[in-house]
Image (cartoon, grey):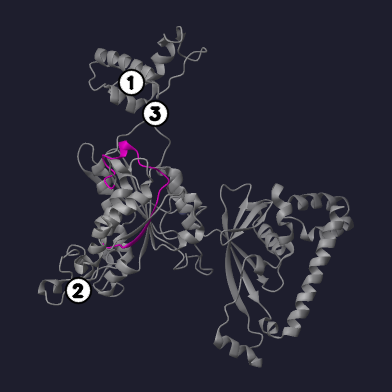
């Protein structure tokens, strides 16, 4: 088998960028492949059109539109890295569609193993894969079927991967069945965002497009999220209301469907009438009896029989054992064709984003296929105050790159954004003291200069925890007196031209400004908030003199020691 594979790999006929100059037919396409593998894909990039962020209606035929470029397809095939999250029903379709659209470098992550019940729709798996990880088996299957594909499977939880691992991808496609997992991926990619100070716009290059597909029975959706530009998952959590239940009056008095009868048998009849013969006649219900268990076949059979009786008395058809099981366990059957349709939306959006050949979907499409085929494109709107993709807070204070400590930064954040983080507890005390004795208050204020910030409970920078309050505060306490530029890794990238200028006396005092985004948490906030800081190097040239540098370092050391002593004293 392996030998066959090796032979296949050497056979250049099927390789991605094989060019056959002799075959005229291939001239129609950028990728002149004798097998015409990309015959349906290549023409998409061979025509001029509207650009990725331009509305088709606004496009005047020139300007910032899309112009054909043969290098685009090789970009997709050689350089674009795609992450597929989930290797279930939708994930299998996605891997197939993406590789057949030309994407070559794909990573897929899934924490599940293959169950025999998956095999009807998760077509990359066979009976011999049962019990094996979905991610690695799906990757293997695709690599075997699509020549040139380099899919890597990760049998991991999404929470187990480092931020830097997530940063390597250009496009992320989600084929998940859980809202929590979507929120997690959304959170990871929103945390990479940085914003322009002047315009408040998300900075180009800090966003990674997310494409989200979802299916439930005959219903499905696909959406494109450009974090910072279009609504993120968190902006629109209202799309996922809690699981709807039937109104009790409908179930009790006017049942119209088989599901209503089943719900009645489960919710009303079971607690009142069920008797467990095996357990010596224990009654159902809250009076100390049996609670309904959807995994207990006796219970389900009982509910099925009662529901059938009730349905007959109302002339309602459709109560079966399987339907009963589906209703009581809230199971929605997985429909392979829905997966296929939603996956096609997603893979095409990924292709559009990678090549820019067409404008992205703006920004949510829903699909319903139970009666007729219905689809509707909707535009969702950003929540400007979104905790994930919003700009967050901006601190006006400009910090001195070589002087400001972490404590200074926390103080400034809290005093500028008191409404968000609350007033520091110490300050409240101070206010009281001040009212009593003004002089005493001033002295206390001095002592509290380096005190722990109370409203802020955690600070992180580039995904690493820099400071934490509460019970862990003592572990991070010494960070407070550190230079903020060290704590947040703020550095000025030396530019040769600038170096020369700095040597020139006239520009010696030229100021250099560096922006930094950190994440700050507070007990009042559900998730960390983005906070933009500005650092300024006031006397950067002084660093060049090693003697002066050493002096400065010694000075700093003294300050640190003083602070530590101060602290110690304060504690006693
Ligand atoms: Zn958002």
Nearer to us: label 2 or label 3? 2
In this rendering, position of residue 536 left or right of residue 133 = right
Question: Is the stretch drawn in magenta largely helix, strand or loop?
Answer: loop
**Vertical placement of residue 495 versus 120, above or below:** below
Would you name the residue on which mark 2 appears? 19
Determine whether the residue tagged by mark 1 lies in a helix, strand or loop.
helix
Task: Report the number of discs.
Answer: 3
Q: Of tags 1 and 3, which is closer to the observer? A: 1
**Residue under pointer 3:** 245
Cα–Cα span, label 1 and label 3: 12 Å
- The image quadrant that residue 252 belongs to is top left
Magenta stretch: includes residue 118? yes
Q: Nearer the viewer, residue 247 or 26?
A: 26
On screen, residue 296 above or below 412: above
Judge by depth and name the residue closer to the eye, 285 or 130: 130
N-terminal-most mark, 2 or 3: 2
Q: Given contact means CB atoms under 8 Å apart, are the residues at marks 2 and 1 in contact?
A: no
Image vertical order of residue 219 relative to residue 93, above or below: above
Q: Earlier in the sequence, mark 1 or mark 3?
A: 3
Q: CA distance from mark 2 to mark 1?
A: 62 Å
The location of residue 486, given as percent across then percent down, is 66, 68
Residue beneath label 1, please?
262
């Amino acid at each position: 088998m392996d030998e066959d594979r090796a032979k296949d790999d050497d056979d250049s006929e099927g390789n991605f960028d094989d060019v056959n100059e002799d075959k005229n037919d291939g001239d129609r396409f950028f990728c002149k492949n004798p097998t015409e593998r990309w015959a349906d894909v290549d023409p998409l990039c061979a025509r001029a059109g509207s650009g990725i962020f331009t509305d088709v209606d606004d496009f005047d035929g020139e300007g910032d539109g899309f112009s054909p470029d043969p290098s685009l397809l090789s970009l997709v095939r050689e350089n674009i890295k795609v992450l597929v999250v989930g290797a279930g029903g939708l994930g299998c379709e996605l891997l197939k569609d993406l590789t057949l659209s030309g994407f070559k470098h794909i990573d897929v992550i899934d924490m599940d193993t293959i169950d025999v019940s998956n095999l009807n729709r998760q077509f990359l798996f066979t009976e011999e894969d049962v019990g094996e990880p979905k991610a690695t088996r799906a990757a293997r299957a695709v690599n075997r079927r699509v020549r040139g594909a380099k899919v890597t499977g990760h049998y991991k939880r999404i929470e187990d991967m480092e931020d830097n691992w997530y940063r390597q991808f250009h496009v992320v496609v989600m084929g998940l069945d859980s809202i929590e997992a979507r929120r997690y991926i959304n959170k990871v990619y929103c945390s990479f965002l940085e914003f322009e100070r002047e315009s408040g716009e998300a900075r180009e290059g800090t966003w990674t497009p997310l494409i989200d597909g979802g299916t439930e029975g005959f219903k499905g959706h696909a959406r494109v999220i450009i974090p910072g530009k279009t609504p993120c998952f968190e902006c629109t959590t209202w799309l996922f209301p809690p699981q709807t239940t039937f109104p009790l009056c409908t179930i009790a008095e006017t049942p119209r469907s088989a599901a209503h009868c089943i719900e009645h048998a489960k919710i009303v009849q079971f607690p009142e009438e069920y008797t467990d013969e095996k357990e010596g006649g224990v009654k159902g219900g809250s009076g100390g009896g049996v609670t309904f268990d959807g995994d207990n076949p006796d219970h389900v059979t009982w509910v099925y029989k009662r529901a059938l009786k009730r349905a007959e008395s109302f002339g309602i058809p459709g109560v079966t054992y399987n339907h009963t099981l589906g209703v009581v366990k809230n199971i929605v059957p997985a429909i392979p064709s829905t997966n296929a349709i939603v996956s096609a939306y997603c893979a095409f959006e990924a292709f559009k984003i990678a090549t820019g050949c067409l404008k992205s979907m703006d920004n949510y499409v829903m699909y319903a296929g139970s009666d007729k085929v219905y689809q509707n494109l909707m535009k969702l709107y950003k929540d400007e105050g979104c905790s994930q993709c919003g700009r967050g807070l901006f601190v006006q204070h400009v910090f001195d790159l070589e002087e400001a400590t972490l404590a200074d930064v926390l103080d400034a954040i809290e005093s500028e954004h008191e409404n968000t983080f609350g007033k520091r507890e110490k300050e409240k005390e101070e206010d009281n003291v001040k009212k009593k004795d003004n002089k005493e208050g001033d002295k206390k204020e001095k002592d509290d200069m380096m005190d722990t910030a109370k409203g802020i409970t955690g600070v992180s920078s580039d995904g690493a925890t820099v400071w934490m309050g509460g019970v862990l505060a003592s572990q991070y306490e010494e960070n407070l007196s550190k230079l903020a530029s060290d704590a947040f890794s703020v550095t000025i990238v030396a530019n040769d031209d600038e170096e020369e200028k700095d040597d020139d006396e006239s520009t010696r005092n030229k100021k250099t400004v560096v922006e930094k985004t950190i994440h700050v948490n507070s007990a009042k906030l559900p998730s960390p908030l983005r906070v933009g800081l500005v650092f300024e190097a006031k006397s950067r040239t002084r660093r060049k003199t090693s003697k002066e540098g050493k002096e400065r370092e010694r000075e700093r050391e003294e300050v640190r020691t003083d602070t530590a002593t101060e602290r110690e004293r304060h504690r006693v």
